[in-house]
Image (cartoon, rainbow, N blue to C red):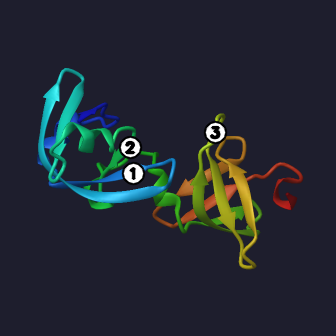
Amino acid sequence: MRVTPLTDDPDRFHRLAECVLWDASRNERETRRIATARRHGEAVVVSFEGCESADAAAALAGRMIALPKSEALPAPEGRFYPWQLEGCRVVTEDGTDVGRVTGIEQAPAQDLWIVTDATGAERLIPAVPDIVMDVDIAARRVVIRPPEGLLEL
C-alpha cells in the first residue's frame, strides 16, 4: 500500500513491527503487523502480513496508520498530541471545575474538545487560543477562559 506519511520521520516505518489501521468513518481500529516498508519518493510503500492480494489491499484504502502511543516521537516543546488531553481536568481561570476531556471532535474550523462533568453532561470547548489559556500535560490540567454562555450550552 502507498502511504502518505504525516510524520516528521518517514523512515521510522522501517523500524516498526506493527501499527494500528484506523477507519475514521466507522471509528474502527485494527492492529496489523508490518511485513515490509520502503520509501518511494515522498511516500512510503508498506505491506502488511496477511494482506497478499490487490483486493485485500484495496479493502484497507483510506485508513489512517497510527502507531502505538509508546512509539510516538516526543512532542515539540510547548506542543502536545491530542490523545494526551484525554482525562485532563478542565478548569476556568478562576478555578471552577468544568470536567475532564473525554474526547476530541474534529470540526472544519478547529477541534472541539469534549468535556464531561461529574453529572455526565458534555460540553464542547473550541480549541482556540482565545478560549484555551493553558495546557499542562504533566499536571493533567487545562485552563480555559470561556466566553459568556459557552458553559451553559
Disc 3 marks which amino acid? Gln
Which secondary structure, mark 1? strand
Against 113, residue 89 (above or below) is below
Image-based side of 114 in relation to 80, left or right: right
Q: CA distance from mark 1 to mark 3?
A: 21 Å
* Residue to which mark 3 is pinned: 110
Q: Nearer the viewer, mark 1 or mark 3?
A: 1
Against 15, residue 116 (above or below) is below
* Residue to which mark 1 is pinned: 22
Which secondary structure, mark 3? loop
Name which of mark 1 and mark 3 comes first in the sequence.
1
Against 41, residue 106 (above or below) is below
Pinpoint residue 131: horizontal percent, then vertical percent. Answer: 72, 47
Q: Residue at x 87, y 60 (%)?
A: 152
Which secondary structure, mark 2? loop
* Residue to which mark 2 is pinned: 63
Residue farthest toward the top in the current orientation of the protein: 41
How packed mark 3 is, by other alpha carbons closer than 10 Å (few <14, some 14-19, many 20 or more), is few
Name which of mark 2 and mark 1 comes first in the sequence.
1
Look at the numbered discs 2 and 1 and tell me whether their residues touch, using CB distance below 8 Å. yes
Pinpoint residue 96: horizontal percent, then vertical percent. Answer: 76, 69
Observer-nearest of 135 and 27: 27
The quadrant holding residue 93 is bottom right
